[in-house]
Image: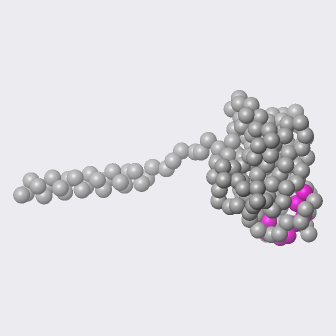
Amino acid sequence: MKNSILTIAVFVITLISSFQLTAQKFKSLDKSPMDVAAFPNSYKISDKLVKVIYSRPQLNGRDLMKLAPAEKIWRTGANEAAEITFYKDVIFGGKELKAGTYSLFTIPSYSGDWTVIINKARNVWGSYYYQQDQDVVRVSGKTSKTEKNIEAFSMMFDKNMTLKMGWGKTVVSVSINNL
C-alpha cells in the first residue's frame, strides 16, 4: 500500500514538474514577425489617425512574383491578413471611407498599378477566406521602383499620410486625406 501511494506521489510530482517546464517555454521568433505602422508615426503622439498591423515576410532569395502572385488576392504581408484602423473618416485613394477597422488586401500587378482593397472581414487568416462582397473600397495603388532591394515586406506612412508598402524593388502608394 505504501509503495502504491509513493509511486502515485512520484508520478504526480513528475507530471506537475513537466507541465511547469512546458508552460515556461516561449516560442521562438516568428519568421514573419508582426509590425505596426501608424500616422502620425511619432511614438510620442498617442492620437493616431490611422494604424496598420501586418506581418513582415522576407524574400530570402525568393521571387516576389511567386510570393505575391500577379492578378491574385494577396493578404498584404504574411500570416493573418493585414488589419488597418482609421480613427476618423478619411479619403482613401480618392474614395470616402468611414472610421473603423478593416482588412487590407491587395492584387499585385507587375505591369502597372496594384489594386488596394479595404474589406469588412476581420481576424482572417491569409486571403483564403476573402470575399469580394465584403469589399468597402477598391483603389489603385500607384507603383514605383526603388534601386535598393527591400528584403522584408514593409509598410509606412510618409509626412503626407500616404500609405507606402514596399517589398523587393516595388513600392505601392495610396494617398490618405482627412475628410
What is the number of callouts on the image? 0
Can you give x and y, in whole percent of width and height, for residue 77 in the image? Answer: 71, 47
Can you give x and y, in whole percent of width and height, for residue 42 in the image? Answer: 80, 60
Residue 137 in view, yes or no = yes
Residue 64 in view, yes or no = no
Q: Nearer the viewer, residue 77 or 18?
A: 77
Residue at 30% in and 56% down: 16
Q: Nearer the viewer, residue 8 or 117?
A: 117
Is residue 124 one of those drawn in magenta?
no
Can you give x and y, in whole percent of width and height, for residue 102 in the image? Answer: 74, 62
Task: Point out the image quarter for the C terminus.
Answer: bottom right
Residue at 91% in and 46% down: 142
Q: Give left or right: position of 2 versus 48.
A: left
Task: Point out the image quarter for the N terminus.
Answer: bottom left
Q: How is the image coloured?
A: one colour
Examine the rendered structure and indicate whether residue 102 appears above or below residue 58. below
- Which residue lies most toward the left here? 1
Examine the rendered structure and indicate whether residue 118 appears above or below residue 114. below
Can you give x and y, in whole percent of width and height, for residue 100 in the image? Answer: 76, 68
Q: Which residues are magenta?
A: 86-93
**Which of the 4 quarters of the picture holds residue 56?**
top right
- Which residue lies most toward the front here? 133
Q: Give left or right: position of 42 versus 140.
A: left
Residue at 9% in and 53% down: 3
Q: Give left or right: position of 35 versus 114.
A: left
Residue at 74% in and 46% down: 74
**Which of the 4 quarters of the picture holds residue 109?**
top right
